[in-house]
Amino acid sequence: MQFVINSARSRNTRLAGIRSFFRFVAMSEPQYMLQCQKILAMPSKRHVRRTVEFLDREEIDALLAAPDRSTGIGRRDHAILLIALQGGLRVSEITGLRCCDVVIGTGAHILCEGKGRKQRTTPLRRETAKVLESWLKERRGGQDDPLFPSNRGTRLSRDALEDIVQRHVLTASKTCPSLVGKRVSPHVLRHSIAMELLHHGIDQTVIALWLGHENVETTQVYVHADLRLKEKALARLTASAENPGRYRPDDKLLAFLESL
């Protein structure tokens, strides 16, 4: 008999699915409320939280410069990386984009469908909008056709998107040594835009809306991973902890006080 050991993360993921089902049961069948409450009260398994991995500005620039934009595939990949690094879209959101989801012009943005079929709008920078506008003209697809098709014209799979990122990370590592041996996935690109926004002082609630987080607490992981914020806090603490010494008034001040 072969035993399969499930990690704490896998158990928590399955428990989340079970909880979702029994919340539905509790609302649909009130007579089972007591049993549902017992199941919903089951605690999650504690696990070690990994530090969020992300790319710094130098690594981002190297990755964006990696695709060969003299070819159609290279221009497609460059547009994909731009969307992933600026928009912070999930893998399913990128592969699910259609040509009609890109709005060019004043207030350029992208419409995407995230978790729970929730739609959100992500604004585009001017340079990103120009790249997508050029790609749409080259793509010549219908409104409901995938924005980034595979070589067969179908929607990209998750594995295909991960392969695109890995391939260009390998190319970028030749000019950016810090990328050598670094595990970079499409989700790491999503983390990178979150850290960029955080470094520029953007409020966490705005970052949560940008990434499509249902709960602002999910965005807290980026604060914990940001070493620069911790260094700033340490610098302030060190400065305030310094002993300024005992104040000694000069003779003029003493004479003024004695004359009162």
Image (tube, rainbow, N blue to C red):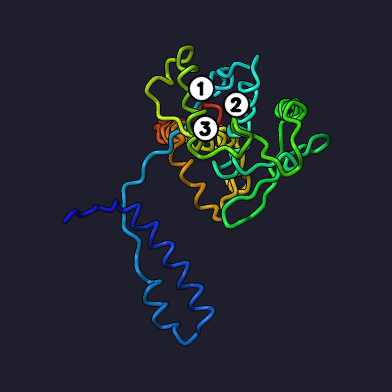
Percent position of residue 161, x then y: 52, 34
Q: Amino acid at mark 2?
A: Asp
Q: Which residue is outermost to the front?
A: 152
Q: Nearer the viewer, residue 21 or 188?
A: 21
Q: Which residue is outermost to the left?
A: 1
Answer left or right for 49 relative to 3.
right
Quadrant hosting residue 248: top left
Tell me which residue sits at (38%, 60%) in the image.
14
Q: Which mark, residue 77?
A: 2
Disc 2/disc 3 C-alpha distance (Å): 75 Å
Disc 1/disc 2 C-alpha distance (Å): 9 Å
Q: Residues within 10 Å of mark 3 (few under 14, many from 20)?
A: few
Q: Nearer the viewer, residue 58 or 252?
A: 58
Q: Earlier in the sequence, mark 3 or mark 1?
A: 1
Percent position of residue 247, x then y: 45, 32
Q: Amino acid at mark 3?
A: Leu
Q: Earlier in the sequence, mark 1 or mark 2?
A: 2
Answer left or right for 6 relative to 101.
left
Q: Nearer the viewer, residue 122 or 134?
A: 134
Q: Which residue does the numbered mark 3 point to in the structure image?
A: 254
Disc 3/disc 1 C-alpha distance (Å): 72 Å
Query: From the image, which quarter does the N terminus lie in?
Result: bottom left
Q: State the SS at label 1.
A: helix
Q: Amino acid at mark 1?
A: His
Tell me which residue sits at (44%, 33%) in the image.
227
Pointer 1 with pointer 2, Cβ within 8 A? yes
Q: State the SS at label 2.
A: helix
Q: Which mark, residue 168?
A: 1
Answer left or right for 96 relative to 226.
right
